Image (spheres, rainbow, N blue to C red):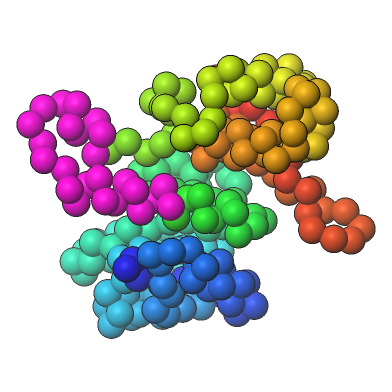
Amino acid sequence: MIDVLIVEDDFMVARIHRGFVNDVAGFRVIGTADCGEQALTAVAELQPDLVLLDLYLPDMFGLEIIPRLRTAGHDCDVMVISAARESEAVRGAVRQGVVDYLLKPFDAGDLRARLERYAARRSNLYSAVVSGQSDVDRALARGAGPAAAVAPLPKGMSVETAELIERELRGAGGSLSAAECAARSGVSRVSARRYLEHFSVTGRAEVALRYGQAGRPERRYRWAED
């Protein structure tokens, strides 16, 4: 079981994120904190494996927490969950060694995909027996970036359909919903969404939520720049 601490100043958002996390097999939320100082205290007391960290906190910028955790001897992983879109914030998070960076707003599926990817990578690190460079590469694989382009497809997915969806998404000149992609490619909406989600998880496509007048937000996919 992977123990998670949520650092979020909005208690309603924290409650929603708690539900998202607890719905993912192998994860459980063991606490929440609504500011930086409270987060530092909670990590010391609860010893979480993973911290879901918002950056806009009332007492400090979220990234300031990470070096203080390391100085105090805490080796928990940190996943940023924030509305901060500034390139400086993203670069800073990468320099601080965060395991992922998820932009708000997002839905349960977005977070689930990243948590499951994190769990798989964590398992690889714990079980890795390093005898050569290939073992190091497998242990550090993030499921994104150049390596993801040649990653094997999940069971039940075909190379031909993946290439078809990729062509449609690349040629769209903007974003597509699963329904629009299905209509353009001739596959079912369910199949289109499955391949689009795969591209999203592996970092080859970007996802944004479009909010309408009522109902659930629409997920729209855009091919990530090469």
Magenta region: 116-139
13 or 116: nearer the eye?
116
Residue 64 in which image quadrant: bottom left
Q: Is residue 123 left or right of residue 150?
A: left
Residue 105 in which image quadrant: bottom right
Q: 54 above or below 184?
A: below
194 or 107: nearer the eye?
194
199 or 179: nearer the eye?
179
Q: Is residue 117 left or right of residue 128?
A: right
Q: Quadrant of the C terminus?
A: top right
Q: Percent x, y for residue 101?
A: 49, 49
Furthest residue in direction right, as rendered: 213
Q: Is residue 143 magenta?
A: no
Q: Percent x, y for residue 162?
A: 59, 23
Question: Please, what is the dominant secondary structure of the magenta stretch?
Answer: helix
Q: Residue at x 29, y 51 (%)?
A: 122
